[in-house]
Image (spheres, rainbow, N blue to C red):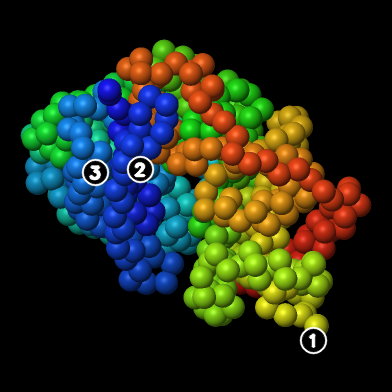
Amino acid sequence: MSFIGSLDQGTSSTRFMIFDHEGKVVAQHQREHQQILSQPGWVEHDGAEIWARTQEVIVLALQKAGIKGEDLVAVGITNQRETALFWDISTGKPLGNAIVWQDTRTSEYLSSISTKDSTILRERTGLTVAPYFSASKLHWMLENRPAIHEAIEAGTARAGTIDSWLLWNLSGGVKEGVHCTDVTNASRTLLMNLDTLDWDSELLDIFKIPRSVLPEIKPSSGKFAMTDANGPFKACIPIAAILGDQQAAMVGQACFDKGQSKTTYGTGNFALLNTGTSKVKSKNGLLTTVLFKFENGPAHFALEGSVAVTGSAIQWLRDQLGVISEASEIESLASSVKDNGGVYFVPAFSGLFAPYWRSDARGVIVGLTRAATKAHLARATLEAICYQTKEILDAMSNDSGIALTEMRVDGGITSNALCMQMQSDILGFEIVRPQIQETTALGAAYAAGLAVGFWTLNEIRIQWQRSQTWHPSSTPEERNAGIDQWKKTVARSLDWVD
């Protein structure tokens, strides 16, 4: 038998998963890494630690599977997007910590960008001008880390998102590391032109980033490099796919066709809608992003909406308020009351993402009476997840003209049956959870398998099977009344920060 490996490098941990031809998990190993929070608004990762964890999880997953690296026909990489770092190819060491996608230190700098340049950035990249994306992080590092300038002058500086760092190390590092990225990660930097699928000189000039430090942009599925025989695999294996984590989840959910959508429920929520080969520019605060580009095919695009706080709102109830002692308890607590008792909660702890993009918003709880209990707050927290997701999907339908009739879901909160039923009731259409829920890692594996002929698109479509489906039980009147109250609550969360 032969297998596909998938390296899934996320915000809090790194894991390596091994899949068989049926798309089933053969073995996996996962390790967390440190979250470096040295100042308010700053979130950093140690690139060297991530590389060390990567080597550990590969070796241990192979041991668990009882196979060798040479038994893998290909490897795919999927990664936390927008997180960026510089490194020196003469030493193999990062030039300072990576700045994580959640980091907001560049907000003030971005506010100084001219209206003209902001318009150019939005039109060419499909993104909004926000600290979320990689360009301002790279700019900050260039401005504040002298060692980077020294390495640029020596010709040894390289920069990229985490996929590029891992690819460089896996393919030989200091000896012969390959410096590439894929179109999905490049499309999250504010530096790639969606029309050319290449770095845009004018955008690079805005952020003062030299093109020489950036990786070559390649399709998501196709041969990037061979693994170093002296590395963790102890074999030369094709690295045949790279995808940002949310795009990988779309591939893992077999959302290859225009009009298909999925939402990943994690610390935050990420909803994507496949718009085919059309680049749909949003008028409702969404992002236009590359969905995937398989080796010889055209690029496919997506509309994306991000919700900053969903699963982390449940963590807040647990860790800050002590309302629950385990995240899993929220379902039974919220089920103990028939409705939210008029309580609504907007968890805008660090502002609101799509479709508002309001950094001045902060969390609010409204509608409290003496009758309100922690159960009502628990229910309002789950509803907040669902209402935020609805606003994104409504914006997607308005922008694309596509009427959604189904949404595929994955991520931790999808195990909460009450929340998924609420989501179906609030949306008014079907919610579907697949049998194989490791969709991000599976998507990277699928893309690598496509590149080496291990799978066909049709085989992947057939492998995708439903595990559970939720159907709406609410009336249109109930849905409309709830969303009206939600919007009133959102209005009260705005303008809290000057």
408 to 420, vertically: above or below: above
Position of residue 354 measured from the top left corner of the image (x, y, whole percent): 63, 50
Q: Are marks 2 and 1 in contact (CB under 8 Å)?
A: no
Q: Would you name the residue on which mark 1 appears?
A: 370
278 to 487, vertically: above or below: above
Q: Would you name the residue on which mark 3 appears?
A: 64
In the picture, the disc for residue 308 is none
Residue placed most toward the observer, 134 or 268: 268
Residue 349 visible in image = no
Name the secondary structure under disc 1: loop
Quadrant assignment for the C terminus: bottom right
First in sequence, mark 2 or 1: give its number.
2
Image point (54%, 41%), residue name? 127
Q: Label 1: how many residues lie within 10 Å, few (<14), some (14-19) or many (20+)? A: few
Residue 421 visible in image = yes
Position of residue 447 measured from the top left corner of the image (x, y, whole percent): 40, 26
Q: Would you name the residue on which mark 2 appears?
A: 8
